[in-house]
């Protein structure tokens, strides 16, 4: 491609961006990776669940297993006319590579594969095992991707010791933040039942909006916890409230609301649900509540993996990264649940999911070097 910088990781990144792999369509991205991995001696296994394509690739049969993980799927580009460039035609402008998935997270995938190629060229007889776990369902429901792969691995006794996710964890500069955990995410769907009636005769009706109003106020005023050494305080947010029948003189028969907790390790989903039920039951309200757990909080304590990641970042930037548990959920929650140490190290996240998503070319090259150094330290 004209005006495209040399470098194996950049060429691979461009090949991946050209594939419009909108969730859950892998669009052939994993086949590109398989060809590179098999050439390095990896045993590659495609695991399909529903519409989701997953890849488990492993080189070696000894422990420990160092796994790199990520996803080939991307969010839709939105109105392509709003983009400065074609979102699926990688374009270099002023040192940045533009395209959907450039930062989230095809640059991480490209850096992983090239780092493995570089490492194996020097250390073909490495200790332990190297692996990749790739899904096409991270941006979607996340039910037939990493979750199912981890279940399959567990059923046959394969245990990942260390895992590095290539999610875009950096905030201002590459490597300034490394995620060592994530908050849990628990969502609720509430229905408050009432009795429809004429607004002029409230005693003949039961307005669910009036019932819910004091409860809503209380839920927002509760201090759920104070956080801890690794996590900020738990947050509660209402994201949607609907009621009414479309007429100004009728009180509605029901109200529905959706809310979400992002919670620390001070809770698990069962204890948090129980606390919410206690709050609701203290009010005179007829309600129904359904729950959806996206993932429990997880935390990787200091150990060999975090030490290696910190050292790799310092070697390339001169600075130690901030260790954080902020941000949304990631597939790390499924991998950590198996007892695996998990960290997330990837490019700057300023443009992810946005129009004109992009990544600094020099950062992709430096990220490759960081991944290489992590492998070298651990194996």
Image (cartoon, rainbow, N blue to C red):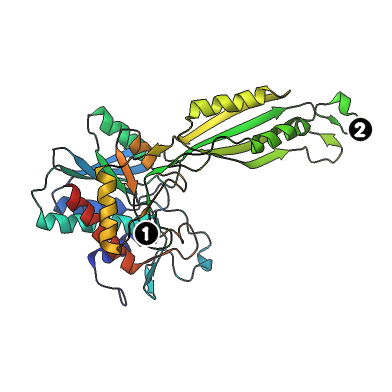
Which is closer to the viewer, label 1 or label 2?
1
Residue drawn at 63 percent across, 31 percent down:
190
Element type at marker 1?
loop
Residue drawn at 47 percent across, 39 percent down:
228
> Would you say residue 340 is visible in this rendering?
yes
In the picture shown, does residue 293 fall above or below 179? above
Residue 294 shown left or right of residue 260 in the figure: left
Residue 69: percent from left, percent from top:
30, 47
Disc assigned to residue 200: 2
Q: Which residue is mark 1?
A: 347
Residue 166: percent from left, percent from top:
33, 52
Label 1 Cα crowd, 10 Å radius (few <14 / some 14-19 / many 20+)? many
Q: Earlier in the sequence, mark 1 or mark 2?
A: 2
Residue 121 shown left or right of residue 29 in the figure: left
Label 2 Cα crowd, 10 Å radius (few <14 / some 14-19 / many 20+)? few
Q: Residue furthest left?
A: 125
Q: Residue furthest right?
A: 200
Front residue of 224/340: it is 224
Element type at marker 2?
loop
Gap between marks 1 and 2 measured at Cα: 60 Å
> Would you say residue 49 is visible in this rendering?
no
Residue 248 shown left or right of residue 366 in the figure: right
In the picture shown, does residue 187 fall above or below 15? above
Quarter occupied by residue 109: bottom left
Front residue of 26/58: it is 58
Residue 63: percent from left, percent from top:
16, 37
Disc assigned to residue 32: none
Residue 58: percent from left, percent from top:
19, 43
């Amino acid at each position: 491609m004209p005006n495209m910088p040399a470098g194996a990781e950049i060429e691979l990144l461009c090949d991946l961006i050209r594939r419009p792999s909108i969730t859950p369509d892998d669009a052939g991205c994993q086949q590109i990776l398989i060809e590179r991995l098999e050439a390095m001696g990896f045993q590659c296994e495609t695991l399909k669940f529903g519409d989701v394509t997953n890849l488990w690739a492993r080189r070696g049969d000894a422990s420990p297993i160092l796994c790199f993980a990520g996803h080939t799927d991307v969010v839709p580009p939105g109105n392509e006319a709003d983009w400065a460039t074609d979102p699926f035609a990688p374009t270099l402008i002023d040192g940045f590579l533009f395209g959907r998935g450039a930062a989230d997270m095809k640059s991480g995938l490209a850096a992983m594969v090239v780092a493995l190629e570089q490492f194996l060229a020097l250390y073909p007889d490495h200790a332990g095992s190297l692996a990749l776990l790739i899904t096409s369902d991270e941006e979607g429901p996340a039910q037939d991707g990493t979750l199912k792969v981890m279940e399959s691995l567990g059923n046959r006794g394969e245990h990942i010791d260390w895992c590095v996710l290539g999610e875009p964890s950096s905030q201002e500069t590459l490597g300034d933040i490394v995620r060592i955990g994530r908050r849990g995410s628990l969502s609720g769907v509430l229905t408050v039942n009432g009795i429809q009636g004429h607004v002029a005769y409230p005693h003949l009706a039961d307005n669910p909006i009036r019932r819910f109003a004091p409860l809503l106020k209380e839920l927002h005023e509760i201090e759920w916890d104070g956080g801890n050494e690794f996590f900020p305080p738990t947050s509660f947010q209402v994201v949607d409230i609907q009621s009414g029948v479309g007429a100004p003189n009728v009180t509605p028969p029901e109200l529905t609301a959706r809310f979400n907790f992002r919670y620390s390790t001070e809770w698990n989903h069962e204890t948090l649900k129980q606390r919410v039920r206690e709050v609701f039951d203290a009010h005179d309200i007829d309600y129904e509540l359904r729950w959806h757990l996206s993932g429990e909080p997880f935390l990787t304590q200091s150990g060999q993996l975090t030490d290696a990641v910190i050292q790799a970042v310092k070697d390339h930037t001169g600075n130690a990264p901030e260790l954080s548990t902020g941000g949304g959920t990631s597939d790390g929650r499924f991998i950590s649940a198996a007892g695996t140490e998990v960290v997330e190290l990837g490019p700057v996240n300023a443009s992810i999911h946005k129009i004109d998503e992009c990544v600094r070319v020099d950062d992709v090259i430096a990220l490759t070097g960081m991944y290489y150094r992590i492998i070298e330290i651990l194996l």
